[in-house]
Image (cartoon, grey):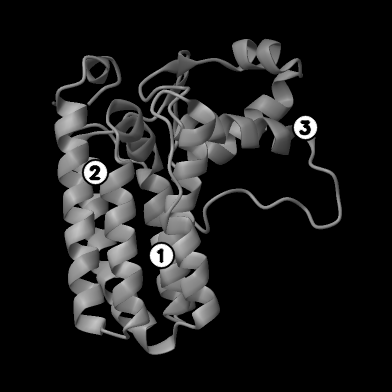
Amino acid sequence: MDDTQISPRVTGKPGRRKRAGKAPSLTEKVYTRLRSEILSCKLEPGMEISESELADRFDVSKTPVREALASLRQEGLVRTFPRRGYQITPITFGDMNELFDLRTIIEAGAAELACEHITDAELDELRGLANVVYLQGETPTIETFIAANRDFHLAIARASRNARLHDILARQIYELERFFYLGAQLRDVNTETNTDHIDIVNALAARDGATARALMIRHNDVTRQGLFQALATSRRFGSIGI
């Protein structure tokens, strides 16, 4: 296990924003598709890619591919090598530990703050998101589950009424998304996630800040340990630079 690989870094808000009122350009279409495939690990960490291969695959010229890759490089999802082309940025246990440490600190505070401000409508939204499940091995349901998990945690951050806290957490969640996809593919986390999320919602509804904080810390620790175990024992793991 090599923790010396370059860690992914995200600058600015996650994702590229489409221009208001205009259809997405070829560059934006290529960017959106590539980013989705990187986050879902369809393009695996450490994989080498080239402009010409991607241009042929997407049936476009090299220009939109090059521009999309430049944006992804700024987000830390792609790296470039002179005369070799591009590589999907590897991920390591060190990356995951750093991201979970930061995420736990942010989310514990967000949950505690949210108890002071969350509305009944927001609690109803969280209850719906807490009950989303997936079928292991079925990509569309995994994508729905990952999106619901992301929306659940960001909704709590939004309920804290601290926009900066929300934006910082959003970046951490997007950086961890590749780990979540791998983890969901390797083990069934439905019951574990749903139970933890429902407990957190109940604490928020009771306006119990100390309990909400403690539950969020425990939830992140359980998720981290589950990912470590699943990824460390996966045969697939050795081929993706972890």
Q: Is residue 177 above or below residue 203?
A: above
Mark 2 and mark 3 lie on one chain; the one further toward the N terminus is 3
Label 2 vs label 3: CA separation? 33 Å
Residue at point 54% right, 31% down? Answer: 140
Estimate how packed mark 2 is, as few (under 14), some (14 to 19) or many (20 or more) residues with alpha carbons within 10 Å. some
Mark 2 and mark 1 lie on one chain; the one further toward the N terminus is 2
Q: Nearer the viewer, mark 2 or mark 3?
A: 2
Q: Position of residue 85 (x, y in %)?
A: 49, 17
Residue at point 17% right, 71% down? Answer: 214
- Residue labelled with disc 3: 26
User: Which of the labelled discs sits on residue 90, or is there none?
Assistant: none
Q: Is residue 3 above or below residue 154?
A: above
Which amino acid is tagged 3?
Leu
Report the side of 1 relative to 72 (left or right): left
- Residue labelled with disc 2: 96
Q: Position of residue 162 (x, y in %)?
A: 44, 80
Q: Say which of 161 and 23 sits in front.
A: 161
Tell me if residue 170 can be seen.
Answer: no
Residue at point 34% right, 30% down? Answer: 182
- Residue labelled with disc 1: 168
User: Disc 2, disc 3: CB below 8 Å?
Assistant: no
